[in-house]
């Protein structure tokens, strides 16, 4: 399923043609909550500490793209009975031992008829109508509805320490089904409302920030361990003190299974790490983890804007409409047991995954092409 995501390499070329409000949306189209991409990393370890004392029947909508497989593996490792519902198109052979019900969220839910589950996890829905149709299809057949949303609902990020009760984005035409930079956050917020309305007492809305790790189809974080491992002078955007947040896809999957086991309800930001992270910390720790001798040249935000590069991968200057983009409060999820792995582990394993891909997949989808990086560094030195 295509989410309309632009790569960070593509965005700068047209970002100056957008209004500031539109560009805020463009920067958040790919914020967490999208179950996208055909590149799936294997992760055989049990992240959840053994089997659950109470096995659940879990229906996962999608389940074979980026987020879903890690939910599946965590659930199976915990002893739950997992059923997938999808079109049978993306990675159809990924889980041959699991029951897969074939259907389409555009209205073909016939394969769900007469079945019951304890929990349904809705990963790929970016428009409210899909959630409305799905909730209608499983009404009376499931106990809890879990919807994967995004911290992109908080656009514009005018404050810091953003909590779950903060205002969310709105849109003039709530019936639009065009998912782009301007509409993404508002449509996610409206989709959340569909889940809440259908399951007022038994819903869980999860709002992840940028999702990273092996298999990431966007390469937003992947660019950094790959680029740093190559050595040389590396363009580092902004200021080393700029705040950064992310969530490893495997930790998100494991936490969501724990959340349904614990019968959690309501709305929850899922952001990491637990301790504040800066752009300087992200790059230095990644560099050390991959054993790189690269040098960092910090290029300020004003220079980058002047050279049509207002964001790089998932960094953007923390000011104005972007002030709190990387300062979302995750206390509720941490209190509920969310455990993010060390950044160093994500760095090493993301690089290992990337290096194992074929030549076509190793064309980075985010970051700077080498010639563009050299051009910008030369211009910065001469400024």
Image (spheres, rainbow, N blue to C red):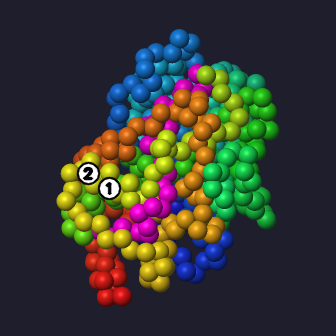
Q: Which residue is mark 2?
A: 288
| Image mark for residue 65 | none
Q: Residue 195: give x, y in percent of width and height.
A: 73, 39
Q: Quadrant of residue 176?
A: bottom right
Q: Residues within 10 Å of mark 1 (few under 14, many from 20)?
A: some
In the image: residue 245, left or right of residue 154? left
State the extent of the magenta-drawn residues as a range. Answer: 234-261
| Residue sitting farthest toward the bottom | 382
Determine if residue 280 is in view: yes
The residue lying at 47 percent from left, 19 percent from top is 78
In the image: residue 68, left or right of residue 261? left
Q: Residue 201: give x, y in percent of width and height.
A: 78, 29
The residue lying at 56 percent from left, 34 percent from top is 334
Q: Quadrant of residue 260?
A: top right
Q: 236 or 69: which is nearer to us?
A: 236
Spatial distance from mark 2 to mark 1, Cα to Cα?
6 Å
Determine if residue 85 is in view: no
Q: Residues within 10 Å of mark 2 (few under 14, many from 20)?
A: some
Q: Quadrant of residue 146?
A: top right
* Whether label 2 touches label 1, CB < 8 Å: yes
The residue lying at 43 percent from left, 17 percent from top is 50
Depicted 190 relative to depicted 113: above or below? below
Q: 188 or 162: which is nearer to us?
A: 162
Q: Residue 339: give x, y in percent of width and height.
A: 47, 33
| Image mark for residue 284 | 1
The residue lying at 39 percent from left, 25 percent from top is 46
- Secondary element under disc 2, as helix, strand or loop, is helix
Number of marks drawn: 2
């Amino acid at each position: 399923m295509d989410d309309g995501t632009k790569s960070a390499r593509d965005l700068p070329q047209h970002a100056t043609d957008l209004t500031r409000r539109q560009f805020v949306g463009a920067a958040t189209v790919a914020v967490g909550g999208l179950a996208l991409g055909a590149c799936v990393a294997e992760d055989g370890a049990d992240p959840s500490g053994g089997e659950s004392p109470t096995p659940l029947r879990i229906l996962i909508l999608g389940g074979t793209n980026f987020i879903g497989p890690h939910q599946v593996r965590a659930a199976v490792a915990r002893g739950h009975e997992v059923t997938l519902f999808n079109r049978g198109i993306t990675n159809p052979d990924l889980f041959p031992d699991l029951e897969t019900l074939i259907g389409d969220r555009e209205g073909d839910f016939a394969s769900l008829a007469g079945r019951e589950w304890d929990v349904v996890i809705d990963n790929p829905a970016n428009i409210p109508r899909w959630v409305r149709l799905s909730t209608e299809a499983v009404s009376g057949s499931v106990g809890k509805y879990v919807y994967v949303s995004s911290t992109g609902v908080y656009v514009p990020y005018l404050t810091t320490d953003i909590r779950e009760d903060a205002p969310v984005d709105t849109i003039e035409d709530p019936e639009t089904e065009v998912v782009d930079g301007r509409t993404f956050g508002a449509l996610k917020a409206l989709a959340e409302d569909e889940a809440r309305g259908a399951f007022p007492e038994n819903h869980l809305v999860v709002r992840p920030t940028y999702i990273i790790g092996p298999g990431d189809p966007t390469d937003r974080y992947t660019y950094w361990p790959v680029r740093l491992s190559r050595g040389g002078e590396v363009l580092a955007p902004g200021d080393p003190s700029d705040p950064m947040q992310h969530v490893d896809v495997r930790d998100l999957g494991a936490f969501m299974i724990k959340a349904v086991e614990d019968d959690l309800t309501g709305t929850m930001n899922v952001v990491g790490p637990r301790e504040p992270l800066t752009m300087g910390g992200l790059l230095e720790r990644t560099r050390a983890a991959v054993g790189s001798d690269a040098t960092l040249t910090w290029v300020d935000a004003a220079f980058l804007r002047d050279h049509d590069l207002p964001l790089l991968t998932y960094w953007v200057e923390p000011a104005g409409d972007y002030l709190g983009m990387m300062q979302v409060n995750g206390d509720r999820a941490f209190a509920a047991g969310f455990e993010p792995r060390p950044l160093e582990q994500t760095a090493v394993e993301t690089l290992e995954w990337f290096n194992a891909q074929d030549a076509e997949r190793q064309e980075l989808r985010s970051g700077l092409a080498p010639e563009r990086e050299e051009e910008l560094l030369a211009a910065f030195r001469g400024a």
